[in-house]
Image: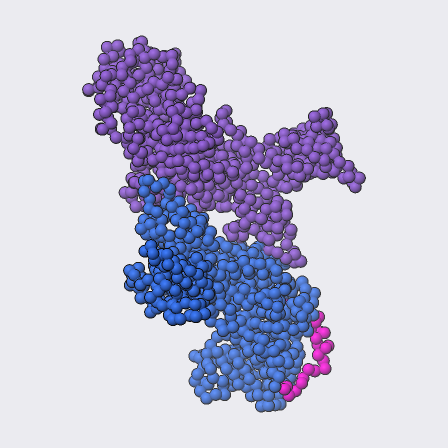
Chain colours: A purple, B blue
Amino acid sequence: MQEETERQARVVFTPSGRRGQFPHGTPVLQAAWELGVDIASICGGRGLCGRCRVVCGEGDFPKHGIVSRPEHLSPAGAVETRFGERNRPLAPGHRLSCQAAIQGDLLIDVPPESQVHRQVVRKEADSRPIRLDPVVRLYLVEVAPADLQRSGSDLTRLLDALETQWDLRPAFPAALLPDLQDLLRDGGWSVTVAVHQDAEILAIWPGFKQSIYGVAIDVGSTTIAAHLCDLGSGNVLCSNGMMNPQIRFGEDLMSRVSYVMMHPEGGDELTREVRRAVNELVAGTAADAGVDPRDILSLTFVCNPIMHHLLLGISPVKLGEAPFTLAVEESVQLAARDLGLEVNPGAVTYVLPLIAGHVGADTAGMVLCEQPHGDGAVSLLVDIGTNAEIVLGNDQRLLACSSPTGPAFEGAQVSAGQRAAPGAIERVRIDPVTLETRIRVIGSDLWSDQAGFSDALPGRGVTGICGSGIIEAVVEMWLAGILTSDGVIDGSQASRTPRLVRDGRTFSFVIHGEQDDKQITVTQTDVRQIQLAKAALFAGIRLLMDRLEVSSVDRIRLAGAFGSHIDVRYAMALGMIPDCPLDAVSAAGNAAGHGARIALLNRASRGEIESVVKRVEKIETAVEPNFQAHFVDAMAIPGGAHAFPDRVRPHAASGPDRPARAQRRRSKRKPPRSNSG
Amino acid sequence: MQEETERQARVVFTPSGRRGQFPHGTPVLQAAWELGVDIASICGGRGLCGRCRVVCGEGDFPKHGIVSRPEHLSPAGAVETRFGERNRPLAPGHRLSCQAAIQGDLLIDVPPESQVHRQVVRKEADSRPIRLDPVVRLYLVEVAPADLQRSGSDLTRLLDALETQWDLRPAFPAALLPDLQDLLRDGGWSVTVAVHQDAEILAIWPGFKQSIYGVAIDVGSTTIAAHLCDLGSGNVLCSNGMMNPQIRFGEDLMSRVSYVMMHPEGGDELTREVRRAVNELVAGTAADAGVDPRDILSLTFVCNPIMHHLLLGISPVKLGEAPFTLAVEESVQLAARDLGLEVNPGAVTYVLPLIAGHVGADTAGMVLCEQPHGDGAVSLLVDIGTNAEIVLGNDQRLLACSSPTGPAFEGAQVSAGQRAAPGAIERVRIDPVTLETRIRVIGSDLWSDQAGFSDALPGRGVTGICGSGIIEAVVEMWLAGILTSDGVIDGSQASRTPRLVRDGRTFSFVIHGEQDDKQITVTQTDVRQIQLAKAALFAGIRLLMDRLEVSSVDRIRLAGAFGSHIDVRYAMALGMIPDCPLDAVSAAGNAAGHGARIALLNRASRGEIESVVKRVEKIETAVEPNFQAHFVDAMAIPGGAHAFPDRVRPHAASGPDRPARAQRRRSKRKPPRSNSG
């Protein structure tokens, strides 16, 4: 072998382009590491983990001045054969780079799945990939066996081996000591350790351990969602959701806070409920993915401030009364077992930071996902729930506030309203001439004027109207000229259609159904609720735009289920968001949950969101003198130049009484009190 | 005040001698801190804690060029009066340095109790004081109240206040979050925090908290001892001991290891027992001192390797079989709650490092207390139990080993032997002419030839002979010429006294009592047991002396209860320790426990012992080829030139058969197998 090691070969790695000369006989993995080429390995080059697979280029590469041939690698030996037998055989052309030795010039391709810091591509077309670099990583380590001559405890020899083999000297928690000796011996003096932030060992397994997992969890007021990821690949193996069982203490968050105010032990009760639910969800998700919960080592959480405090066992009472003081806004890291989570006993939990008393870690997750601070364009991010969280800004400044929209967009406080669920009207069209309506309901793809509509309806038929449906109804009524710009259902149009019916001193509009109790109607009060909700939202946005001194935004992203569901044209026409070219407005999907997943898979993202959050200027709508004026101004329906440029309202009905009315409202209607959620 | 602050005064602090010029009106505490004078304060200068008391010198101090008068301090105001009312009035001449302002030249004396890093003097005359600098300290902090204008969570404002007021930015554990908001409000936005190593908050109390406590615990095979200390003063408030309840699983450690080997759940059972006992002892000690266990924030432990592993929940099985591998030898830090200790939930526990498989944290504590590495003199430290732990060396090199002495020195395996307890013979004298004996028993100050001896005996009379008694008996028998140098009770002397009685093929010597079942006798087998024990001890010492290449030592310290109990002249004459001037030999008292107390009160000592322990050369007697030879050589009774220079043996009885016998023993008698304890 002597003469062979003296001969040098040229090796080029793709896609990095790094290159170097190496003596014949050098393992490819060693060459890669010497050049700083990003190739993964858990087993440290023992041919066990299969993470370091590479593909040998074949042919003439004049650009690199080399001719690469598979036979310029040492032939596959016993280790690779055994690997193929234990796992699946290596794909043709694939080699374990730790086993294949250089025997001539080579072009070596490192496929994405072999890169340590591979890009994890997300499902959403417009979302950036995540650079895989989780806080917890596995390392296989071979420990010197104990013998009488060799002094040193088992722990000392384990830590020495980690230092020699992986250049790590992590802390070792006392909780792992009781099992250490048996694990080392069971593994034949080889163990895999899970190391957190290169700083602390979380778990040990005998021998080689292939995979560990993490869970990103979004604890909402209504639902809890969990995304189980393989920390080695970054892939989501399973996503599940469940209702937040706290709903029995109140649908909205303020009822839950009131419950705690009235019941001294209520906070603990709510904490137990949410932790139990998270536990159940994690267990179920792991079971669905065929993953042992003890292999879950890392969890991240996003949640609104009240759910955040309840999850952490902090009473939310202070968030329900002025001055709405958070116990903690910083990110929180704690042992999963301290949350009662039945995962690996060493698992660590990271809760993203809150932004302000009413702007939670879910918003922080949205910011991490959407990166408004990433460029100079002014982004507007909106997550609409009972409160709307609003973030505005760019790489220079970021502002955030929460605005008390109330539950109307969720279908509550609307006469025929309901949650977005099968049977709910989600789309509404009104013919401006005939005033006839067409609808579509959740659970069916057919419009009501299409053949087979009735047969295709979900079980209980048309059951109500959800948030997006009522928004479309109001805008369509306005477009059809039966609603004035300041939100009065125009009774003078009643002669045009039997759908406009008197209802005491005001009028209602029948969206769907015969004259029976299943009729779905939009009442004057319903329109007012939607106006109040959208005015609160828009007033919050205006406040931030004023503060940022901008009159328009470059990009609008609507986060959350509601944001995915509404047709942005209607949202714009209703005046929920500023008028702006339609192609600059899009749904962000589950941005909060994605933020949790980013924090799970990329350790640097944690520091990033922590520092971004510190920079965010928090606007407290409750004490902003301009909020009420903006709120009153935002009651009217603006239409929006970009929303429906082609549709012309047949009756421009902004009556002459408008200023007086607005004045009256200005004194009578106060914006709803600010609250979290 | 303007003109007053412009005037300067000269201020000298004693005992530090630091001096400076300060504007009139400067509080004395501020001047002290500016000069780096060591004055304590928990409350940060608010006149609450009283730690910063100083005494104003009165008179002419030409050496310093000043005339100091009490009236050069501002008069005592409302704060000092209120302090005196709440606590005890300040002693005459004492002032709170945070309240008293400089109004002229001053000599200010900082009494020891006002110094942060005061010297804690220990009871032992020859022991160094401990520099008080515990790992946990209290800080009073005033937090900005929450209001709508001021953003920031309660935690942020607490941490900001700690940074501004104390220059600390410690981590905040999630476990404290649930109580934070109420504590801040209960304390009127002032709280006292306990901070660990300046790095982490362990506990919070509303308002001002005066005192917290620590416990140093020595977990021995037989007894567990606890010393409760005030972490503010360093004083021991209460010391208690109790039997180790594991004794029911076996008196000696190896029986307990065997129990665990035979019972799969035995390790957990023994762990539960010792933790329960420690809990009980800590609770009892706190109750005796009138201290709330929730005010205990810091604990330190010393113990032998087997007790160490059992305390930490590690099976000791590996320590009972070759190669006797420790799970961990490093110091261990863990939450007290993880040991099931019912103290403050934030309390931290520090377990001193082990030195080797058979040389424990108790020996590390002894080293920390005795500081053999502190100077160039060669120290020999010996702690005698079932095993003897031996440390030899100086500031250049330190060596340690454990030698299997067996339980003879503890009174076991000796016919009339018993533990050192009331009624046990502890002192023995034999008249070399008459061969009459005099004894003294534990529990009485009278010798048996003094009037009133019988009346002064403890309840059950003379019950047996303890370790120190049997050692004195053997040496006295040898001095009286009725025992040969190689340990044969010389039957040829039987004509001189009826106390020498035939016992089968050998002879016994009656130490005390009439011819009845209460007679205390030393048999030939008893002598052999003592010879085996002392030979093992001395062989270990010889091994270390060989390795260090010294033929004598400069200082011998005998640690532990046994070391305090034996008369060093007899130990030397018997050949337990090397011959050496008597004034270089002394008892070290409870050196292990003191080491635990040092680690409790002085944070730097932890790093010190951790690095010293790493340097210690560990000698495994079981695999040392010379050990057996040394052991056989050490069977004889050397007398010792320094032990009894005035007493001449009437019959020099080292028979001609000695070399042959030694040869025989060399092949027959193996040293007992090495084991821990």
Quarter residue B214 falls in? bottom left
Query: Is residue B254 left or right of A224 when viewed as pictured?
Result: right
In the figure, B142 relative to A552: above or below? below
Task: Work out whether residue B95 or residue A196 is closer to the camera in this orientation and state it.
Answer: B95
Residue at 39% over, 64% down: B105
Residue A90 appears in the rendering: no
Expressed as whole percent of the image width and height from the top left, the position of residue A330 reads: 42, 42
Residue B175 image point, x, y percent: 41, 48
Residue B582 rendering spot, x and y as whole percentages:
59, 78
Residue at the limit of the structure toward the right, as seen here? A3
- The percent position of residue A469, horizontal first and vertical second, equals 34, 21
Q: Residue at x 23, y 25 (%)?
A: A663
- The one nearer the camera, B86 or A482, is B86
Q: Nearer the viewer, residue A277 or A466?
A: A466
> Residue placed at 74% from the left, 34% from the top?
A9
Q: Quadrant of the N terminus of chain A?
A: top right
Q: Which residues are magenta?
A: B647-672
Confirm whether the magenta stretch covers residue B380.
no
| Image quadrant containing the C terminus of chain A | top left
* Residue B645 visible in the picture: yes
Q: Looking at the image, how many numbered discs can be counted on the residues?
A: 0
Q: Quadrant of residue B38?
A: bottom left
Q: Is residue B662 magenta?
A: yes
